Image: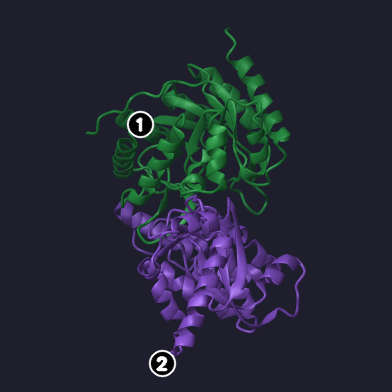
């Protein structure tokens, strides 16, 4: 069994994903956020403007590096070249933490560049835990893993996703990135209670919350798709408020927008709402 | 319907085969709910690759128009499903797809090659080019042997190829499409970085074999041999002219900031 990594201290605050259309705003240095999150793979490069901007922003703000390609659930193990480049970025930026998703993206032959669903089996849990041990030991720090949106479940599933996440965190010492929109999307797609899902998680392991919009179901398509291309909807705000009531402390909360990226002001308005809800939810009774 | 996969590795292989190809048989035990979900994953895969190609080949897409570009993108993604962890890799070799699809318009493949070369440069290691003055200082004490053995380091990921079309005119005119862009004779298109900004310049054609040879480790003395390539029995004047040509090239490369090291 791998040695459990050092704990990640809680960090409370409100932030945004830093995306290209807003580089100039962040470089100006007066965006009212407590942290930014960037997509790791966009900065696992050797030089150029993007990397220089990230280093410049890092001088003023804590940065979280959030990956989409670690493929922590791959039966074939992790990509060593990927891990080496992630480690270089981690050393360069000294992020608040490093995160990725509970999913797989590739086999040895091909990469889907999508967050594919894990069969929720005991074998898959062991593979994920082994891979997390390897990633955390390479990075020399604990990581966060995000609950994904999913569009199908497997007939061979042996446990629920929340039980899978709980056991994964217990065995590896990793932390959780709670994507409230993803809980909502999957609960609607698979017909489970989002609140019960929250209640079964080890909430003391949550260090961050993602909030995002999604593409709703249509008469032709019953499935809700996680698209990050629009505003957070009311039921997701309500679930976020409920999650905050259940959490032991306020984590790092952020709005994710990856498509149809609006002017920064629109995202800051959404972030203000996240702040207001948190103030109400975390008030002593 | 295929046999029920038994291990995680088998399940993932079957799942990804189904994402990549809708004709792949569904695993045993899958019903309508899994089929509906798989449709979403297939759609996500395709739109991610199309999006990555559109981001990388913005100018080629403008040149071709959205429908033709989408057809080229789909052909490319089907023929070259990505294997690496960075989605940008899906764009590798798109110029060859364009060459095969648009044989009547070879400028399309040249434009696609140029965009890929510029993307590669955008994330290349940062470097400080030698100025003409730096070079003059560094070579001030050079004797004849030093010159003959001189090797040059170029900007990381600098690319060069011969092109038959005026890419500068095509690039500037977009989204308008110019009809007459064929060059009177091929030129060497060299991509490089000015600070953080990828750029390109068209030089005389003989710059292409010269830079390629020197990137591969040829010395300045050997460069003169490269420039005499089609002359099996050069006379003193030929050698003198080739030496002068090499000097002019060196001056041009320094002027464009392409050289970052000597005798690396």
Where does residue A1 sit, x and y in percent of width and height? 22, 33
Q: Name the residue under label 2.
A: B233
Q: Is B124 rendered above or below residue A142?
A: below
Where does residue B217 sit, x and y in percent of width and height? 37, 68
Q: Is A225 rendered above or below residue B247?
A: above
Question: Which residue lies at the image location 70% right of the left edge and 71% below the top edge?
Answer: B170
Q: Pinpoint the chain carrying mark 2.
A: B
* In the displayed structure image, the side of residue A211 where residue B182 appears, left or right: right
Where does residue A206 sit, x and y in percent of width and height? 46, 26
Q: Colour of chain A?
A: green
* The C terminus of chain B - image quarter: bottom left
Q: Mark 1 points at which residue?
A: A141
Tell me, by letter, which chain the rendering colours purple.
Answer: B
* The N terminus of chain B - image quarter: bottom left
Packing grade of label 2 (10 A; few <14, some 14-19, many >=20) is few
- What is the residue that sits farthest to the right in this orientation? B176
Q: Is B250 rendered above or below residue A269?
A: below
Front of the two marks 2 and 1: 2
* In the displayed structure image, the side of residue A131 where residue B120 appears, left or right: right
């Amino acid at each position: 069994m791998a040695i459990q990594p050092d704990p990640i201290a809680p960090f409370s605050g409100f932030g945004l994903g830093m995306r290209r259309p807003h580089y100039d705003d962040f470089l100006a240095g007066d965006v009212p956020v407590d942290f930014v999150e960037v997509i790791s793979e966009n900065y696992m490069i050797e030089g150029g403007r993007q990397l220089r901007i990230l280093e410049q922003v890092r001088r003023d703000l804590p940065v979280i590096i959030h990956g989409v390609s670690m493929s922590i659930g791959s039966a074939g193990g992790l990509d060593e070249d990927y891990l080496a480049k992630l480690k270089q970025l981690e050393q360069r930026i000294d992020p608040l933490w490093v995160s990725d998703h509970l999913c797989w993206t590739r086999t040895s032959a091909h990469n889907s560049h999508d967050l594919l669903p894990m069969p929720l089996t005991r074998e898959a849990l062991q593979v994920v835990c082994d891979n997390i041990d390897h990633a955390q030991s390479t990075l020399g720090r604990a990581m966060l893993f995000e609950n994904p949106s999913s569009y199908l479940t497997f007939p061979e599933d042996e446990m629920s996703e929340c039980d899978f996440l709980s056991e994964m965190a217990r065995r590896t010492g990793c932390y959780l990135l709670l994507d409230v929109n993803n809980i909502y999307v999957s609960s609607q797609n698979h017909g489970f209670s989002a609140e019960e899902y929250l209640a079964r998680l080890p909430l003391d392991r949550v260090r961050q919350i993602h909030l995002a919009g999604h593409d709703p179901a249509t008469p032709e398509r019953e499935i809700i798709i996680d698209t990050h291309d629009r505003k957070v909807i009311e039921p997701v705000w309500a679930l976020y408020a409920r999650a905050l009531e259940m959490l032991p402390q306020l984590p790092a909360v952020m709005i994710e927008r990856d498509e149809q990226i609006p002017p920064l002001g629109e995202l800051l308005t959404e972030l203000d709402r996240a702040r207001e809800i948190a103030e109400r939810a975390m008030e002593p009774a | 319907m295929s046999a029920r996969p038994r291990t995680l590795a088998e399940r993932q292989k079957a799942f990804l085969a189904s994402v990549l190809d809708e004709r792949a048989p569904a695993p045993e035990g899958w019903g309508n709910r899994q089929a509906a979900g798989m449709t979403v994953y297939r759609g996500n895969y395709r739109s991610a690759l199309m999006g990555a190609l559109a981001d990388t080949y913005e100018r080629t897409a403008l040149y071709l128009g959205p429908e033709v570009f989408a057809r080229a993108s789909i052909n490319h993604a089907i023929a070259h499903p990505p294997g690496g962890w960075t989605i940008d890799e899906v764009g590798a070799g798109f110029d060859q797809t364009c060459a095969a699809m648009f044989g009547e318009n070879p400028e399309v493949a040249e434009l696609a090659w140029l965009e890929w070369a510029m993307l590669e440069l955008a994330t290349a290691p940062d470097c400080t080019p030698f100025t003409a003055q730096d070079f003059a200082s560094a070579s001030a004490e050079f004797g004849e042997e030093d010159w003959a053995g001189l090797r040059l380091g170029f900007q990381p990921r600098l690319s060069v190829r011969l092109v038959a079309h005026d890419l500068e005119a095509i690039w500037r005119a977009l989204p308008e499409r110019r009809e007459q862009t064929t060059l009177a004779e091929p030129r060497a298109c060299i991509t490089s970085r000015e600070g953080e900004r990828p750029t390109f310049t068209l030089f005389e054609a003989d710059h292409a074999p010269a830079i390629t040879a020197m990137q591969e480790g040829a010395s300045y003395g050997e460069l003169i041999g490269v420039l005499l390539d089609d002359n099996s029995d050069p006379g003193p004047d030929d050698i003198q002219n080739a030496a002068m040509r090499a000097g002019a090239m060196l001056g041009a490369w320094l002027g464009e900031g392409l050289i970052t090291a000597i005798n690396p």
